[in-house]
Image (tube, rainbow, N blue to C red):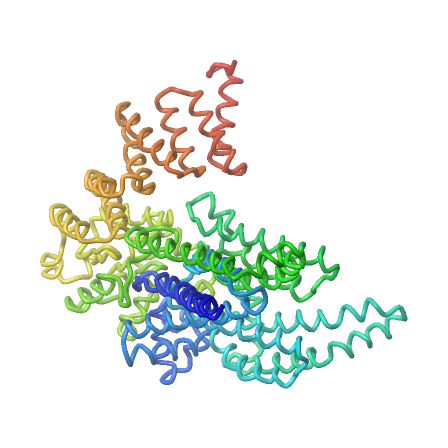
């Protein structure tokens, strides 16, 4: 018996270590500096003591400098910059990993206390994969940690009524309100517990309303008082009451659409992401566990109900909340499954079965096998872009991330700079105060009119571009060509062939162009990349790039009219990864632009290979339909558009073309369907 106990204890340690190791792998991705907010956070931490205006205004931009801006995460920047000063990007990455391990460890411990080690272990596996949605170094990691700490304090106080422990929330919220905007979630959780204490006596009391309110107040008064105190604590931020209410107002002036703020139902029609399936599965399991708990206990646990509704809405509202939803789901599902577990284990046959220690050892073995399988899967998928890995493994900047700024400084280039949204934060850290940016990735720092009437239109309208360029005297364009928005793709297509601008540099992340009229002709002559130089450099870069980098460079080649070069890169990718869906779709799209029927048939081959490999999105069926239409196969074109509608009944492209087909049939220009 002692030997079996020792074996089980060892297996539990090994399993928990394995779970932590999976978290470590997922968060050990290199930093792609040109597309995240980290640069701005570092610059905030660097200059906040020198110029407090960074707390209140759009400090880094020359376009809308005087816009009022609430810097709600300034303290995170101070912490990040401190780690950066001590150990650079490597220590920053290590800090992010340790923070993620602490968050998961605390969450797992909460779940384990409720439903036991093994069930929590099984539930942890999908949650760990869901965490891959938010692995970048972000202030919101502090919110994840503080949400779990707040949850732990609330549930422990609710259990033992030691209300003094709630005082720990005061210093926690004092830091939290200055670290990240999700401090309001902590207030919501305390409010939920206050409501959970208030409502039962309120509804049980059969007397008048005053008596019912009094009964509810007496039951919940200590929670309500703490909530009021915490609200006042949250006023202790540089923007006082504005900072307190900012979480409820931040989206009011968003003039720029961000993918992470879209719902999974919207994004699910545009991309293949297995985390969306994991989210839906956990959501189903969470609702099921709540219903099961109610049916068994005949009691509705209000704090659990409120939390499930709240965090489910957050996850459904925006993809950025999927990781947070995953953490909370681990706690809530474990909590709700306790009654179900006790119900089954109260049956004599099951008591006898589970009491046998080998059964638990078998569970440990199965869980350990799943962890080892997950480890090998993650290691294998780290070599190519997937739902769980967007960058290679490592603790530093992604290879070549900072090469463009070295070129900029070494060649003494200068602004005014026109840059795109994605790269703005990186430029702030690299170039401020010598240069300010045209825009950066803070939609709330710019007016809605700026994005609607200036930023996006000037990238699609060459005439407007020339007008705005003349207004600001753009001398340099510093643009991340990884930007996949339609306006960015259109801008690159026309600016790379604009005779007034010369391409002088590009890598797998960014392009730099100089204004020929405002730049020394000797510098232009020295640095300009002609067509041959462009092709040679792109081939060299593509050969050394990771899979994501290859796609970025192939896309750049397409925008520059070098479709043969893009085709070669996509084919090289397929040689190594024959089933790569992105490469198959890209090649299909290239051939679909041809006038040759032979090329159109090749396009169909690539599209069908992608579809057969699991790439079933409305977009690919729309492309297949257009190819069939050009081949005069109208029936198959119609079938493909209807397949697009089967996936998304509101798909505007399919609806438009099916309406056109209907009109053409009524006019007698297409044969009727038999």
Q: Is residue 253 visible?
A: no
Please state if 111 lies on the left or on the right of 455 as rendered.
Answer: right
Q: Which of 211/54 is in front?
A: 211
Please state if 672 lies on the left or on the right of 39 as rendered.
Answer: right
In the rendered view, would you say 655 is above or below 454? Answer: above
The percent coordinates of residue 365 (x first, y second) are 43, 57
Residue drawn at (48%, 61%) of the image? 121
Q: Which of 297/259 is in front?
A: 297
The percent coordinates of residue 274 (x first, y second) are 44, 49
Q: Which of 253/47 is in front?
A: 47
In the rendered view, would you say 82 is above or below 653? Answer: below
Residue drawn at (66%, 75%) of the image? 159
In the rendered view, would you say 359 is above or below 166? Answer: above
Q: Which of 99/660 is in front?
A: 99
**Residue found farthest to the front:** 1
The percent coordinates of residue 385 (x first, y second) are 32, 51
Examine the image and state in which quarter residue 421 appears: bottom left
Residue drawn at (58%, 57%) of the image? 312
Q: Is residue 149 visible?
A: yes
**Residue found farthest to the right:** 207
The percent coordinates of residue 156 (x first, y second) are 62, 76
Q: Total of numbered circles in the picture?
A: 0
């Amino acid at each position: 018996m002692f030997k079996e106990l020792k074996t089980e204890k060892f297996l539990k340690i090994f399993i928990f270590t394995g779970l932590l190791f999976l978290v470590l792998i997922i968060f050990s991705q290199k930093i792609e500096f040109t597309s995240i907010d980290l640069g701005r956070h570092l610059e905030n931490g660097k200059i906040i003591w020198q110029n407090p205006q960074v707390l209140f205004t759009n400090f880094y931009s020359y376009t809308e400098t005087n816009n009022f801006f609430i810097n709600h995460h300034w303290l995170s920047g101070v912490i990040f910059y401190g780690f950066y000063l001590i150990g650079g990007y490597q220590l920053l990455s290590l800090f992010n990993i340790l923070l993620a391990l602490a968050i998961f460890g605390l969450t797992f411990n909460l779940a384990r206390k409720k439903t036991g080690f093994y069930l929590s272990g099984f539930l942890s596996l999908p949650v760990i994969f869901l965490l891959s949605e938010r692995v970048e170094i972000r202030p919101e990691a502090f919110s994840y940690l503080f949400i779990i700490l707040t949850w732990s304090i609330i549930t422990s106080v609710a259990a033992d009524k030691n209300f003094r422990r709630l005082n720990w929330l005061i210093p926690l919220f004092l830091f939290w309100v200055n670290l990240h905007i999700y401090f309001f979630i902590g207030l919501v959780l305390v409010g939920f517990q206050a409501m959970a204490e208030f409502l039962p006596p309120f509804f049980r009391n059969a007397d008048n309303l005053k008596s019912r309110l009094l009964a509810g107040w007496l039951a919940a008064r200590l929670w309500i008082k703490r909530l009021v105190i915490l609200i006042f604590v949250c006023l202790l931020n540089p923007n006082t009451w504005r900072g307190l209410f900012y979480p409820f107002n931040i989206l009011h002036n968003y003039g720029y659409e961000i993918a992470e703020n879209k719902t999974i139902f919207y994004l699910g029609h545009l991309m293949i992401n297995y985390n969306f399936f994991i989210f839906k599965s956990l959501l189903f399991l969470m609702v099921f566990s709540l219903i099961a708990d109610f049916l068994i206990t005949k009691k509705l646990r209000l704090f659990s109900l409120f939390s499930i509704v709240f965090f489910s809405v957050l996850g459904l509202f925006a993809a950025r909340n999927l990781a947070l939803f995953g953490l909370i789901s681990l706690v809530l599902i474990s909590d709700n499954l306790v009654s179900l577990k006790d119900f089954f284990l109260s049956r004599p046959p099951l008591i006898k079965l589970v009491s046998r220690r080998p059964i638990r050892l078998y569970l440990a073995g199965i869980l350990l096998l799943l962890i080892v399988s997950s480890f090998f899967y993650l290691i294998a998928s780290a070599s190519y872009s997937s739902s769980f890995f967007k960058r290679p493994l490592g603790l530093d900047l992604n290879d070549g991330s900072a090469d463009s700024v070295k070129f900029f400084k070494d060649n003494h280039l200068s602004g005014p700079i026109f840059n795109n949204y994605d790269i703005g934060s990186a430029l702030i850290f690299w170039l401020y105060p010598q240069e300010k940016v045209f825009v950066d990735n803070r939609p709330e720092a710019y007016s809605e009119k700026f994005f609607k009437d200036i930023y996006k239109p000037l990238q699609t309208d060459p005439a407007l571009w020339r007008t705005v360029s003349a207004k600001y005297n753009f001398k340099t364009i510093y643009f991340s060509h990884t930007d996949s928005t339609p306006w960015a793709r259109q801008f690159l297509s026309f600016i790379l062939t604009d005779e007034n601008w010369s391409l002088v540099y590009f890598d797998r992340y960014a392009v730099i162009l100089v204004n020929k009229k405002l730049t020394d002709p000797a510098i232009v002559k020295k640095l300009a990349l002609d067509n041959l130089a462009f092709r040679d450099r792109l081939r060299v870069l593509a050969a050394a790039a990771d899979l994501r980098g290859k796609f970025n460079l192939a896309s750049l080649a397409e925008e520059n009219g070098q479709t043969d070069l893009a085709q070669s890169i996509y084919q090289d990718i397929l040689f190594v990864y024959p089933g790569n869906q992105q490469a198959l779709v890209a090649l299909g799209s290239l051939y679909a632009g041809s006038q040759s029927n032979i090329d159109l048939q090749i396009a169909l081959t690539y599209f069908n290979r992608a579809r057969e490999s699991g790439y079933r999105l409305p977009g690919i069926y729309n492309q297949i339909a257009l190819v069939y239409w050009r081949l005069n196969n109208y029936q198959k074109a119609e079938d493909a558009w209807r397949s697009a509608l089967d996936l998304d009944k509101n798909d505007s492209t399919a609806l438009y073309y099916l309406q056109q087909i209907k009109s053409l049939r009524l006019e007698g220009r297409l044969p009727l369907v038999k």
